[in-house]
Amino acid sequence: MALSKVRKGDAAVLFFATLLTEADLLVLQTFTEAAPFDLAVYHEGVFWRFQIKRAQRERKKGFFYVPFRKITTNTKGFKVYRYTEEHTDFLVGVVMETLDVYCFPIAETSHIKATVTVDPLGEQDKRFQAGRKVDAERYRNVVKLGDTRVQLKSSDISVGG
């Protein structure tokens, strides 16, 4: 049985929480999907909020994309939510297939309307790009909390049996 989108998202949140914990940070998790962020970190007297998104693979074009918005539907139609500094401090894309993490300070993402492409495998077909391509190395596996940069190295984390 295939995992649902919610369960896949949960796996990304738990993986990122593991990396933060391994970096000796105090991680707090919300109890509801309705919260505007998934995790918070308490560091040097300050709380930092993180919205985690699992990167989705565009198989034919050879890249992953991270959604920078949330779309909900009901009987009245759909609603698009864009994340802002009011909701979160960081938007995090997790590529579970490669265990890469992309941490985007939300203050630097206001110009991105839908998605950002990341290419941890170096397979992107340059003829096709969805969303907006970013300088991925600048954001890969790094979290900046105030004046402290936390390097997250997923290769140091043992996942599975």
Image: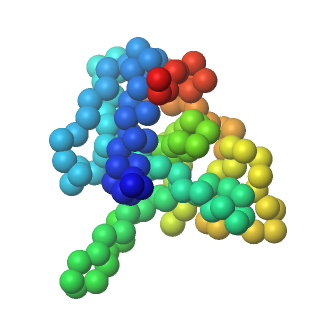
The percent coordinates of residue 16 (x first, y second) are: 44, 33
The percent coordinates of residue 84 (x first, y second) are: 38, 55
The percent coordinates of residue 39 (x first, y second) are: 32, 37
The colour scheme of the drawn protein is rainbow
Going 28% across and 83% down the picture, which residue do you hit?
77
Residue 63 in which image quadrant: bottom right
* Residue 32 horizontal side relative to residue 133, left or right: left
Q: Nearer the viewer, residue 58 or 72?
A: 58
Note whether 150 is above or below 65 in the view shown: above
Residue 12 in which image quadrant: top left
Note whether 40 is above or below 97 in the view shown: above
Going 60% across and 23% down the picture, which residue do you hit?
155
The percent coordinates of residue 150 (x first, y second) are: 52, 22
Q: Residue furthest top?
A: 24
Q: Nearer the viewer, residue 143 or 29?
A: 29
Note whether 30 is above or below 82 in the view shown: above
Q: Residue furthest left?
A: 31
Q: Is residue 87 visible?
A: no
* Residue 41 horizontal side relative to residue 136, left or right: left
Going 39% across and 55% down the picture, which residue do you hit?
1
Residue 128 in which image quadrant: bottom right
Note whether 161 is above or below 134 in the view shown: above
Going 65% across and 51% down the picture, which residue do you hit?
118
